[in-house]
Image (tube, rainbow, N blue to C red):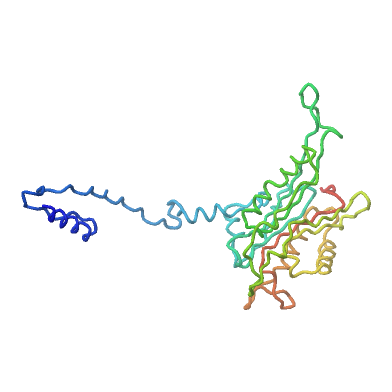
Amino acid sequence: MLNRVRSAVAHLVSSGGAPPPRSKSPDLPNTTSALPAAPPEAPRSPPARAGSGSAVPVKTAEARASFSRPTFLQLSPGGLRRADDHSGRAVQSPPDTGRRLPWSTGYAEVINAGKSRHNEDQACCEVVYVEGRRSVSGVPREPSRGQGLCFYYWGLFDGHAGGGAAEMASRLLHRHIREQLKARVMATIGVTRGLGDHNLKVCSSTLPIKPFLSCFPEVQVYDLTQYEHCPDDVLVLGTDGLWDVTSDCEVAATVDRVLSTFEPNDPSRYTALAQALVLGARGTPRDRGWRLPNNKLGSGDDISVFIIPLGGPGTYS
């Protein structure tokens, strides 16, 4: 009997787990316990067809959900698809609907030529108000001078630490600044530039980039109250997609050329200037990629530009 049990076990192992054939020996059971039957496979849904009204495939939905642009662009679903088109690289700006960015700011952006899946630049333009102290009774006081702080905030964030980090910074950094100011904790806001890209190498080399990145910000202070400014005095805030191919002198020449074609009280002049700078850095598509008028390579990077009038928001009709 022991030999027959060993034979049955050996057969079970050699057959990959299939039950042994029924035995007619009186020393072994005539039947074996059947393995539980696998449930029938559920019928698969046919793949969704474009325009059929079927559910969007999961991968497509995730890809769209992972791509976002600044809310002030007010992009429709179709506009979002155009903004994500690496071949056309259409310039995006806030719509001319009468509702303009704070401080009459101009803005324009364009996606890269294919170096990353989505536009990794992010932008933010906000008016931030820090509440003042409450009264002793706990009843909020009416906002007045000296009881609160109101300031304008602009931010451009490159995707050095990843597109998700840039998006998070564009949504949360100004809120963090507000909370820090509210708590009277000044000069404690750090930057995250040195956190990511540990394995990033210089293009076509084995030279690591990380040692050349610094977590210490470069801070410049310009006191607007110390100078008089005209409507043509502007601050150009741009990502490396602009400055990699455009010099300071070329930017200044574009500022003079574009603004001179608009009336000083035209509210669209700063957006037009931002668009001109983005177009100038992007170039035009040719057989060998995007080229500038001098036939040099245009910027294949994401390009984002703010134009901030130093003379203030002004009064526009």
Q: Nearer the viewer, residue 239 or 5?
A: 5
Query: Is residue 191 found left or right of 249 in the rendered image?
Result: left
Residue 174, position as x, y percentages in the image:
73, 46
Total residue callouts: 0
Q: Nearer the viewer, residue 198 or 179?
A: 198
Farthest front residue in view: 2
Query: Is residue 236 found left or right of 80 in the rendered image?
Result: right
Q: Residue at x 72, y 55 (%)?
A: 156
Query: Is residue 64 found left or right of 302 in the rendered image?
Result: left
Residue 310, position as x, y percentages in the image:
86, 53
Within the image, what quadrant is residue 240 found in?
bottom right
Q: Residue at x 79, y 50 (%)?
A: 104
* Relative to 257, residue 218 above or below: above
Q: Residue at x 71, y 58 (%)?
A: 108
Within the image, what quadrant is residue 112 found in?
bottom right
Residue 47, position as x, y percentages in the image:
39, 57
Within the image, what quadrant is residue 218 found in?
bottom right
Query: Is residue 306 found left or right of 32 in the rendered image?
Result: right
Residue 298, position as x, y percentages in the image:
70, 72
Q: Residue at x 72, y 62 (%)?
A: 213
Q: Nearer the viewer, residue 75 or 212?
A: 212
